Image (cartoon, rainbow, N blue to C red):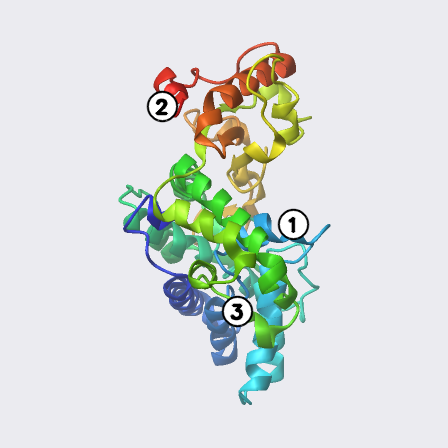
Amino acid sequence: MTHMVYPGAVHSRFEHSLGVYWLAGESVEKLKSYQGMELGIDKFDIQTVKLAGLLHDVGHGPFSHLFERNFLPRVISGSHWSHERMSVNMVDYIVDQHHIDVDSEMIKRVKEMILASSEFAPPKSSSEKSFLYDIVANGRNGIDVDKFDYIVRDCRACGLGCSFEFQRLLETMRVLDDEICYRAKDYLTIHKLFSTRADLYRTVYTHPKVQAIELMVVDALVEANNYLEISSHISNPSEYWKLDDTIIKTIETAPSKELKEARELILRIRRRNLYQFCNEYAVPKDKLENFKKVTAQDIVCSQKNGGVTIKEEDVAVCNVKIDLTRGKHNPLESINFFKDYESEEKFMIPDDRISHLLPTYYQDMIVRVYSKKPELVEAISEAFENFQLKTYGIKAQVHSTPEKKKRRYN
């Protein structure tokens, strides 16, 4: 739903998948040109990596991560469904359904490459050429062509500057001990990869209005689920492929009375009558270790007696984690470097050897609260402040909710 705040962001996962396909091919071709004889890269390897790039996201549902992380846990208790595993299922379905004549070993490796950065990553088919599994979805250190594509593409589409240059990494990377390594002098370029990604999360993907719209879409999907049986298709590729973003138009135009509440939410989005952002705060550093997600119940239980009564269904809470892909750890700690092209030794760069201008803390947790009813902004904002005082002894938010916003709908 980013395009409703950044109108230029109308590209889809189709364009992204084509970009990853091309970059995956470029990466393996570069390695072949540098170390082809040594690494034994052949046409089979190149085709396999490119196919993995093309198909790595084919298992995403409507509205991508929103479907997986926000909708499904609301309608399926304890859901462990993942788009990576669904991508693997969809690959099998596509090959079988369309009788595609493709090498079975190639498809096996494609599926392993798709799962490589997920918690479901299987053991590699072969101990040889394991570096190929780090190109599309890198579970080893997070540097992959998936990020190369969406970071540059999204920055351009949203009008943001992007100082990260993936071309430099493609030109200088080398394989040592079956692992893709980078020149030590390029560690700042790698850091820009992770910091630019974090900037996109902060300013685009988790923009307060983007999240307000996403909260409303999730509520609409949940309301519509019993009637449309949306979640029933997630294990059946022959039905699942029919699910896409047009589910919103289906809800919006269906006359069924069972979809009345969902339709009203979509209409509110169209009219820009969104859930109202009340306020947010960054969890203090010393509280991050034992942080527990804040819930609507926490806010409701913090309201004072005697005022307007707020209920859990009136409040929406987002717990927004933004990091450099490795949680509280420095992402450079998991990357191997080399000194120069004559060197055969790989090494990691310790914290005390990097620029002192780089951050020493690597993650944020932001708690953000919304009012589903405009007239409750003031009451929910006050309850949110009370929660902060009760939890931390201070108001952790940068400033109070503007009075103009509190009074606007009263």
State the quadrant of the C terminus.
Answer: top left
| Callout in the foreground (2, 3) | 2
Residue type (three-letter) at the residue carrying disc 1: Pro
Q: Is residue 238 left or right of residue 253?
A: right
For label 2, the SS is: loop
Q: Position of residue 349 (x, y in %)?
A: 53, 37
Q: Position of residue 251 (x, y in %)?
A: 47, 60
Q: Position of residue 314 (x, y in %)?
A: 56, 32
Question: Which badge, 1 or 3, comes first in the chain's sequence?
Answer: 3
Report, in whole angstroms, how far the alpha carbon at label 1 lies from the one at label 2.
34 Å
For label 3, the SS is: helix
Q: Residue at x 49, y 31 (%)?
A: 370
Residue 261, placed above or below residue 384:
below
Residue 24, placed above or below residue 352:
below
Which residue position is annotated with label 1? 73
Q: Is residue 10 left or right of residue 136?
A: left
Residue type (three-letter) at the residue carrying disc 2: Arg
| Viewer-proximal residue among 95 and 20 | 95
